[in-house]
Image (cartoon, rainbow, N blue to C red):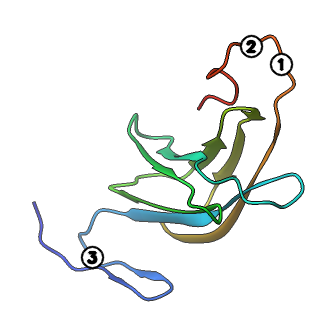
Amino acid sequence: MRNCTTLVLLATLGCLGCDPTVHARGYVRDAAGRPVPGATVTLRVEASDRAEVGRADSAGWFALTRFGAYGPPFEVRACRDGYAPARQEVATEAGLHDALQLVLTPAVSPSSPPGQLGGC
């Protein structure tokens, strides 16, 4: 494994020979603009079967990093019980993708069992 250093200062500076890295950060909100705390957020790279998974904090903020992210495209997906999933495709190269906005809308499936609405 190669040893290299990556410096992050509001942007990602890579080095020759390092694996590409994707940083996806932003907010999960509902249609009224309110944060959706606890939403599950997934960062997936199309060329890989692996994904990074995290949760939005009390302000709806999330930050995920994916090392060895060969792509694009990259997909960021958010879900929470009671909401339809939201997704955003990022079709640019590896680097910093900041201020993504994922908007969850209420699910309209009252017959679905609890825990199955908005699954990722």
Q: Is residue 49 visible?
A: yes
Q: Is residue 78 above or below residue 90?
A: above
Q: Residue at x 68, y 13 (%)?
A: 113
Q: Residue at x 87, y 25 (%)?
A: 108
Identified by mark 3, the residue type is Leu
| Mark 1–mark 2 CB contact (< 8 Å) | yes
Q: Position of residue 65 (x, y in %)?
A: 41, 61
The residue where tag 1 is placed is: 109
Identified by mark 1, the residue type is Ser
**Residue toward you, 55 or 8:** 55
Q: Position of residue 62 (x, y in %)?
A: 55, 61
User: In screen coordinates, is 85 left or right of 14?
Assistant: right
| Mark 3–mark 2 CB contact (< 8 Å) | no
Q: Residue at x 38, y 39 (%)?
A: 50
User: In screen coordinates, is 64 left or right of 107?
Assistant: left
- Quadrant location of the N terminus? bottom left
* CA distance separating discs 1 and 3: 50 Å
Q: Which mark is residue 16?
A: 3
Q: Is residue 89 above or below residue 106?
A: below
Q: Nearer the viewer, mark 3 or mark 2?
A: 2
Label 2 residue SS: loop
Q: Residue at x 18, y 76 (%)?
A: 4
The residue where tag 2 is placed is: 112
User: In screen coordinates, is 79 left or right of 55?
Assistant: right
Label 1 residue SS: loop
